[in-house]
């Protein structure tokens, strides 16, 4: 361990101890009330980082396969080893922003300023703007709580701060997946930050302690130094617009290396023959004792531990308190969370338009929540799938509603109860599958479509249902509210598990990838690869195109690994033993339950064998 890292760890330990001593709120607790700032730690002004610190890492970037000093676990190391830098040429990656701890170490200048209440002059927030990729952070100082787990994530996350002596202590959650280093070492969307800003005159030290249960064995500590500048640097804008991709590349082509085939490993070892041990990182490598522990077999770390099983460590964003929670997405569109699957409701001067109905266990509470959003009865229900977590509340929600238009008269009047209750829409295969499963007739979609899309205009917005053939099943749809620019993805996209590819009901891995790419073909980010079109997953937190593209990349990469094994003649058991999902298991994997990692691998294997 370098002396610089030792000092950083020591400083972090002292500050963390100070935070505990002075009553720093533990993770999950509401932040303290607003405090008056001390002039000695006013961060306002212009700051320039000392770029000679860790210059290799922050300039051109570290060499491929050099993860020295990073406490990576197996998943983090394998993710980095599979990373091909040409992935950044994909359209949806070209303008990826920087995640907060990476942004703080980026090239370029920064500006900080205070936001105060115009009447009381109490400190509301501290803002920090970084020139590179226009990274803007807001550190709330007014005691507000962190958002619920199902709220959106962003590059900068959600930060709350308080002053501790001569330090500003900041806690950050709700980060997007990003990078620790630009040679492919990932930081997950489950990472949380504890940061400290300490100012001594015109010198500022920023210390961050990153806790990432998905990719790190233990916290990562880093420090960055800044010097205060007397004048405005100007030239603050650093916009990005995605351009052309590599021509003639298939939409399901995501550059990556198979396990054990990253050429950067051999190049690094040839260039640094005396510094090979520890270059693939790990918790042990950040401690002084590692230097005297003797060389380890780095080659054995290039592939997953055969046959090992790992489950997700991600925290589920779905509440389990037995209540239905309402979260406003945008304009007149809301997300209802709590009944075993996300429900979306659009309201206006017509009856509510509902997408999916959850498991139905909390249907009465769902109906009550919708009634608080609109005095009108539910008019339309759209099902993205026939699965129970999408349709479980159909019967009760339909019965509680009313459709004065008797939508689809010529087709729907042949069904019992047509014109009584809400009208249920969906692909014809949803109705077919539900009928085969002996579902109640009044719970089935009666306003169905067969190809491409079903469109309507309701509550002042154009609404389109797009069929995604043979994705999760043969009847899935995603729904686009065009004016609100909200896409409801159903189970084609979730943030909680590997995609449920229901092979018995027409699901395929290639169809799943096509469906994710179809969603991405309709998203537009607002700034630096985030915001803009919002995407509601079947399960998990409200997302945008970044989460969808990371999920798409994951499915493609896992498919390509399994396909390579199948072409080499591997059996299903051999494929499972090779652990083709190893770098994603800590984020999406499951050892038990209705959809396990082995089921996901087997579904891909079966569809590829066909």
Image: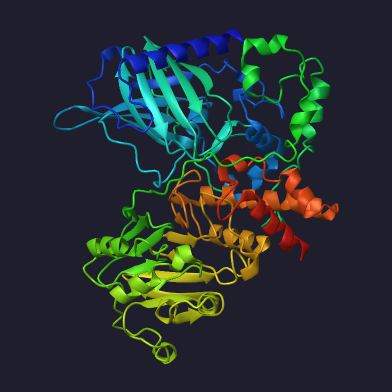
- Identity of the residue drawn at 50% across and 78% down: 438
Q: Nearer the viewer, residue 486 or 97?
A: 486
- Identity of the residue drawn at 64% across and 19% down: 284
- Identity of the residue drawn at 25% across and 71% down: 349
Q: Nearer the viewer, residue 77 or 393?
A: 393
Residue 550: % across, % down: 58, 47
Q: Is residue 606 above or below residue 526?
A: below
**On the image, which quarter does residue 5 sit in?**
top right
Residue 111: % across, % down: 39, 26
Q: Is residue 30 visible?
A: yes
| 53 to the left or right of 484 | right
Q: How many marks?
A: 0
| 302 to the left or right of 442 | right
Q: Nearer the viewer, residue 197 or 289?
A: 289
Q: Is residue 244 above or below residue 182?
A: below
Q: Residue furthest left?
A: 119
Q: Nearer the viewer, residue 546 or 501?
A: 501
Q: Is residue 1 visible?
A: no
Tell me the quadrant of the picture where the C terminus can be found.
bottom right
Q: Is residue 418 above or below residue 165?
A: below
Q: How is the image coloured?
A: rainbow
Residue 340: % across, % down: 43, 57
**On the image, which quarter does residue 128 sit in?**
top left
Residue 379: % across, % down: 32, 75
Tell me the quadrant of the picture where the N terminus can be found.
top right
């Amino acid at each position: 361990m370098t002396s610089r890292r030792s000092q950083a760890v020591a400083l972090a330990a002292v500050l963390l101890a100070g935070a505990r001593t002075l009553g720093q709120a533990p993770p999950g607790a509401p932040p303290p009330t607003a405090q008056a700032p001390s002039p000695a730690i006013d961060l306002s002004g212009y700051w320039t980082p000392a770029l000679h610190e860790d210059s290799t890492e922050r300039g051109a970037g570290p060499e491929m396969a050099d993860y020295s000093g990073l406490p990576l676990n197996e998943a983090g190391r394998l993710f980095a080893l599979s990373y091909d830098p040409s992935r950044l040429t994909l359209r949806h990656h070209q303008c990826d922003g920087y995640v907060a701890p990476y942004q703080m170490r980026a090239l370029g200048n920064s500006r900080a300023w205070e936001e105060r209440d115009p009447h009381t002059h109490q400190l509301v927030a501290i803002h920090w703007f970084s020139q590179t990729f226009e990274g803007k952070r807001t550190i709330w100082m007014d005691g507000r709580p962190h958002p619920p787990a199902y709220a959106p994530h962003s590059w900068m996350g959600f930060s709350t701060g308080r002053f501790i002596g001569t330090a500003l202590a900041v806690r950050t959650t709700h980060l997007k997946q990003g990078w620790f280093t630009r040679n492919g070492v990932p930081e997950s969307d489950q990472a949380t930050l504890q940061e400290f800003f300490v100012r001594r005159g015109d010198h500022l030290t920023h210390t961050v302690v990153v806790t990432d249960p998905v990719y790190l064995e233990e916290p990562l500590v880093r420090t960055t130094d800044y010097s205060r500048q007397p004048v405005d640097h100007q030239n603050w804008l650093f916009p990005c617009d995605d351009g052309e991709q590599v021509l003639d590349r298939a939409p399901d082509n995501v550059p990556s290396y198979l396990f054990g085939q990253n050429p950067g490993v051999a190049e690094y070892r040839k260039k640094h023959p005396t510094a090979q041990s520890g270059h693939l990182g790990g918790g042990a490598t950040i401690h002084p004792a590692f230097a005297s522990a003797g060389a380890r077999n780095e080659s054995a770390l290039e592939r997953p531990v055969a046959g090992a099983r790992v489950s997700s460590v991600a925290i589920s964003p779905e509440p389990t308190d037995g209540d239905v929670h309402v979260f406003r997405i945008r304009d007149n569109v809301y997300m209802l969370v709590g009944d075993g699957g996300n429900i979306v409701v659009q309201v206006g001067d017509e009856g509510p338009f509902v997408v999916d109905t959850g498991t139905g266990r909390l249907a009465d509470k769902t109906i009550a929540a919708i009634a608080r959003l609109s005095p009108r009865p539910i008019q339309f229900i759209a099902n993205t799938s026939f699965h129970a977590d999408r349709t479980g509340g159909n019967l009760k929600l339909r019965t509680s509603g009313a459709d004065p238009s008797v939508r689809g008269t010529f087709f729907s009047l042949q069904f019992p109860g047509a014109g009584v209750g809400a009208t249920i829409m969906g692909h014809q295969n949803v109705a077919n599958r539900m009928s085969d499963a002996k579902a109640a007739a009044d719970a089935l979609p009666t306003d169905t479509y067969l190809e491409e899309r079903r469109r309507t205009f309701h509550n002042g917005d154009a609404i389109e249902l797009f069929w995604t053939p043979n994705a999760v099943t043969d009847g899935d749809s995603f729904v686009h509210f065009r004016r609100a620019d909200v896409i409801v993805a159903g189970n084609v996209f979730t943030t909680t598990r590997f995609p449920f590819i229901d092979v018995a009901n027409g699901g395929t891995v290639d169809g799943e990838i096509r469906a994710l790419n179809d969603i991405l073909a309709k998203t537009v980010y607002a700034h630096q690869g985030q915001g803009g079109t919002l995407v509601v997953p079947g399960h998990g937190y409200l997302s945008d195109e970044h989460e969808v593209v990371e999920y798409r990349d994951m499915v493609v990469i896992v498919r390509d690994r399994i396909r390579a094994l199948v072409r080499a003649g591997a059996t299903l058991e051999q494929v499972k033993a090779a652990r083709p999902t190893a770098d994603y298991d800590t984020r999406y994997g499951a050892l038990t339950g209705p959809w396990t990692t082995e089921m996901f691998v087997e579904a891909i294997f079966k569809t590829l064998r066909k």
